[in-house]
Image (tube, rainbow, N blue to C red):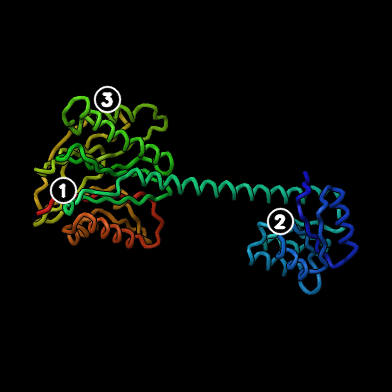
């Protein structure tokens, strides 16, 4: 298949070869055919207006076909202007070198019309496919970038602070491993005296996990606030977990699930009523004692068992104390050596910086975790939420 918009360049120092190849190309339907007598002229013409393909002789004065190919490669022009080498039978070793440098194919002399049609058609088709792939990739990149912005806009960026006269200090960060991720956090008021805090981790990565994350976050807020509106009382964490689990088990053909730690914090007393649905245990941050994991019995993750039972518990966060809730992307972060960040290293860091206010704590820990990883690619989402009661 040919197109009147396809521009071809024939490069050969032999005028008879140029004219013969040009006539044959035009008989095949390629009417926009330009001619160059050597490599220098070919490079200048292609720089002015790149051709859809170049048929390039191997042996030429001033600048050989190999030298032309090397320059096109160094300038990253071979994708825009693919090259078919023209060679005599005695030059096949040189043709192999050209193919290694990035030439798409070759044509032996004398020219065979059938072979010319097949090889040029194949080269132009591959160029068209590459261009289409680039367009699709660019579109997907733009869509994923927008999906990332939309996902990050779903989690709060403004938090309660003692500077606003609220008796609690909260801050959270989330760093997806891919363009979009499966972690979530949330922080919202049930009323002026009660705050919901949550951190979750979906079982998968990428777009499916991001959609499941959005579903989970919406269910947490929706189920909690709807319960209050309908019953006139605050729900227990286990009631909300059960309701969320029922919905997440529905229409779940990929059998995805989410681990989730969430609770309702009484801002006046510091009592946190919580449920841990298979999630990493949070860390208690005491003003006078070393940090330690919260000792609690885990309930099942959400979305696994339709009739699962969820056991709630409670703990009092004393004035001056706090809590850090994380996703497992933090202890699982890898260093270039292959070592993981681990819970022991996290506890050691918390021993040093656990006294910081919520925003300073999340910023400092994030910096330490990514400094530990150095240039190692992030394999899992990193999320943490810190909460502290003022002394």
Reply above or below: 131 against 9.
above
Cα gap from disc 1 to disc 2, whole angstroms: 68 Å
Asked whether the beta carbons under mark 1 and mark 3 sit within 8 Å of each other, the answer is no
Q: Nearer the viewer, residue 231 or 183?
A: 231
The x, y position of residue 125, in whole percent, is 71, 47
Secondary structure under the numbered disc 3 in the rendered image: loop
Query: Residue at the right extreme?
Result: 16
First along the sequence among labels 1 and 3: 1
Residue found at x 19% / y 49%: 387
Q: Which mark is residue 166?
A: 1
The residue at which mark 2 appears reads as 104
Secondary structure under the numbered disc 1 in the rendered image: loop
Secondary structure under the numbered disc 2 in the rendered image: loop
Cα gap from disc 1 to disc 3, whole angstroms: 38 Å
First along the sequence among labels 1 and 2: 2
The x, y position of residue 176, in whole percent, is 37, 49
Horizontal relation, residue 339 to residue 188: left or right = right
Frontmost of labels 1 and 3 is: 1
The residue at which mark 3 appears reads as 307
Query: Residue at the bottom extreme?
Result: 62
Q: Nearer the viewer, residue 228 or 132?
A: 228
Residue found at x 64% / y 67%: 74
């Amino acid at each position: 298949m040919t197109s009147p918009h396809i521009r071809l360049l024939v490069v050969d120092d032999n005028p008879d070869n140029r004219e013969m190849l040009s006539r044959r190309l035009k008989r095949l339907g390629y009417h926009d055919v330009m001619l160059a007598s050597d490599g220098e002229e070919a490079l200048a013409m292609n720089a002015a207006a790149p051709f859809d393909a170049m048929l390039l002789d191997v042996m030429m004065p001033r600048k050989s076909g190999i030298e032309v190919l090397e320059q096109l490669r160094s300038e990253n022009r071979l994708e825009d202007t693919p090259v078919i080498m023209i060679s005599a039978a005695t030059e096949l070793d040189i043709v192999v070198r050209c193919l290694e440098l990035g030439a798409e194919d070759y044509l032996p002399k004398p020219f065979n019309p059938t072979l010319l049609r097949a090889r040029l058609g194949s080269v132009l088709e591959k160029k068209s496919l590459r261009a289409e792939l680039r367009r699709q990739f660019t579109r997907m990149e733009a869509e994923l970038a927008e999906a990332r912005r939309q996902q990050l806009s779903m989690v709060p960026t403004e938090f309660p602070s003692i500077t606003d006269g609220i008796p609690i200090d909260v801050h959270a960060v989330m760093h997806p491993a891919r363009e979009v991720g499966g972690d979530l956090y949330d922080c919202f008021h049930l009323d002026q005296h009660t705050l919901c805090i949550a951190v979750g981790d979906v079982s998968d990565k990428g777009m499916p996990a991001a959609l499941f994350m959005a579903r989970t976050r919406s269910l947490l807020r929706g189920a909690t606030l709807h319960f209050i509106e309908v019953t006139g009382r605050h729900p227990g964490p286990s009631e909300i977990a059960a309701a969320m689990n029922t919905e997440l088990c529905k229409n779940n053909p990929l059998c995805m699930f989410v681990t989730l730690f969430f609770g309702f914090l009484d801002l006046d007393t510091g009592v946190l009523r919580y449920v841990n649905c298979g999630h990493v245990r949070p860390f208690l941050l005491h003003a006078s004692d070393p940090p330690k994991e919260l000792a609690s019995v885990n309930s099942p993750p959400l979305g696994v068992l339709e009739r699962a039972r969820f056991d709630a518990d409670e703990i009092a966060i004393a004035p001056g104390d706090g809590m850090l809730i994380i996703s497992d992307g933090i202890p699982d972060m890898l260093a270039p050596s292959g070592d993981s960040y681990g819970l022991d290293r996290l506890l050691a860091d918390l021993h040093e910086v656990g006294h910081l206010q919520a925003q300073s704590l999340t910023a400092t820990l994030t910096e330490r975790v990514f400094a530990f990883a150095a240039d190692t690619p992030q394999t899992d989402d990193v999320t943490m939420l810190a909460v502290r009661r003022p002394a």
